Image (cartoon, helix red, strand yellow):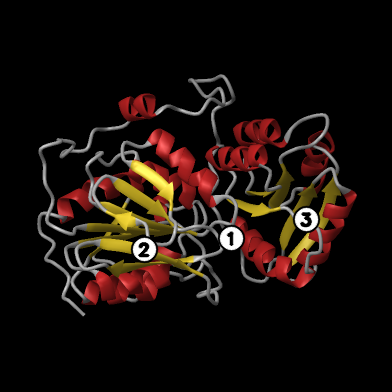
């Protein structure tokens, strides 16, 4: 969006109450203009043509046409940045994560019960502003080139993607090696693209993705279905080791700690950092203190600056650091800030990052003990 121009938002939801709550929340931001609302996708199609919004908020479960079907049609014909507003029912969570695969750039939990408009405004307005500057690409229509809405299996996905050298059960990495990955807007697909290209016996991986509470488990389960290594939502005390990736739970910070013979994670509440919980900076700074072996840290697509200061600290402590380049980012915010501060040793397109992470292990020294 150009400087000074308001972000034009169309709210699509079948609930009049939710439409009002979202409208009230967005009205708190003088950089956002609500150009209209729609009770279902059919009306939304007409209003998109008439009002030409910059961003849509989209419910998943609606009459006449469900939100996921509408999103697939929209992204194949008239791509727009979409923020999905979903309930926390399991099926809706799964559809919301699927919507991210189809081009939605953000997801937010639907207001339920007593809800502070001020609290909602903080999260929703941030996501709307992030969506407004996001790169959105046209997606193949459902049914074209295999894009029929089915979730790709790990085997199918790995046959479509280039093999990474080192997927050898006999290969051993330096002791206590660690991969640390941070991301925000557009990050769910970016993380999937990285993890699905890493071998099963990769070093332990810790991941902080900005995602609301309730959606991180569904996101982790999807990664586990499509990636070679085990992927799970972290719980306090989980071990970090080869062949396992831990995802920070939404609404909680995840820190790394040294447990005498190996790594564990600490999952804890606490104030938001860079307006985020979980925070990439919190995770990266904990790695500086806890690491006992080589560390490769990657900062992927995302709005804001979370992770930039932590990446600077990691690089100073001896970690190998990689930032995603502007051309492959959905939003070039967090990586841009890390690059500006000198935290990124390498700046690479997304699909080159997995190979670079593995290659960096060959030259990465053990982190200095703190």
Mark 1 vs 2, N-terminal side: 1
Q: Quadrant of the C terminus?
A: bottom left
- Distance between the alpha carbons at the discs numbered 1 and 2: 29 Å
Tag count = 3
Picture residue at 71% right of the left edge, 36% below the top: 67
- Distance between the alpha carbons at the discs numbered 2 and 3: 31 Å
Q: Is residue 129 above or below residue 15?
A: below
Residue at image mark 2? 265
Q: Quadrant of the N terminus?
A: bottom right
From the viewer's perspective, is the residue at label 3 or at label 1 nearer?
A: 3
Q: Residue furthest right?
A: 16
Q: Which mark is residue 111?
A: none
Q: Which mark is residue 112?
A: 3
From the viewer's perspective, is the residue at label 2 or at label 3 nearer?
A: 2
Picture coordinates of residue 256, whole percent (x, y): 33, 67
Image position of 194 (left or right of 93):
left
Residue at image mark 1? 130
Q: Circles 3 and 1: CB distance less than 8 Å? A: no
- Distance between the alpha carbons at the discs numbered 3 and 1: 24 Å
């Amino acid at each position: 969006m150009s400087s000074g121009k308001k972000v034009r938002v169309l709210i699509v939801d079948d609930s009049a109450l939710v439409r009002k709550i979202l409208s009230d929340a967005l009205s708190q931001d003088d950089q956002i203009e609500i150009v209209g609302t729609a009770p279902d996708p059919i009306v939304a199609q007409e209003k998109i043509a008439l009002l030409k919004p910059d961003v849509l908020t989209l419910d998943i479960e609606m009459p006449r046409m469900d939100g996921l079907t509408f999103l697939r049609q929209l992204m194949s014909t008239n791509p727009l940045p979409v923020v999905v507003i979903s309930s926390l029912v399991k099926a809706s969570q799964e559809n919301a994560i699927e919507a991210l695969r189809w081009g939605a750039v953000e997801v937010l939990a639907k207001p339920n019960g007593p809800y502070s408009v001020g609290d909602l405004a903080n999260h929703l307005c941030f996501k709307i502003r992030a969506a407004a500057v996001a790169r959105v690409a046209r997606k193949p229509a459902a049914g074209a080139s295999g894009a029929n809405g089915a979730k790709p299996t790990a085997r199918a996905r790995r046959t479509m993607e280039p093999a990474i050298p080192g997927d050898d059960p006999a290969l051993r990495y330096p002791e206590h090696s660690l991969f640390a990955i941070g991301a925000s807007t557009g990050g769910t697909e970016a993380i999937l693209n990285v993890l699905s290209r890493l071998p099963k016996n990769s070093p332990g991986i810790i991941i902080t993705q900005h995602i609301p509470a309730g959606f991180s488990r569904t996101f982790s389960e999807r990664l586990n279905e499509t990636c070679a290594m085990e992927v799970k939502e972290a719980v306090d005390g989980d071990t970090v080791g080869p062949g396992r990736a831990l995802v920070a739970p939404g609404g909680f910070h995840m820190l790394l700690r040294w447990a005498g013979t190996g790594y564990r994670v600490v999952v804890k509440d606490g104030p938001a950092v860079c307006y985020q919980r979980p925070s990439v900076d919190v995770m990266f700074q904990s790695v500086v203190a806890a690491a006992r072996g080589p560390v490769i840290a990657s900062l992927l697509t995302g709005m804001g600056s979370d992770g930039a200061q932590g990446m600077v600290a990691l690089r100073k402590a001896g970690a190998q650091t990689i930032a995603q380049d502007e051309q492959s980012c959905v939003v070039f915010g967090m990586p841009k800030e890390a690059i500006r501060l000198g935290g990124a040793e390498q700046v690479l397109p997304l699909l080159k990052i997995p190979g670079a992470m593995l290659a960096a292990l060959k030259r990465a020294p053990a982190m200095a003990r703190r």
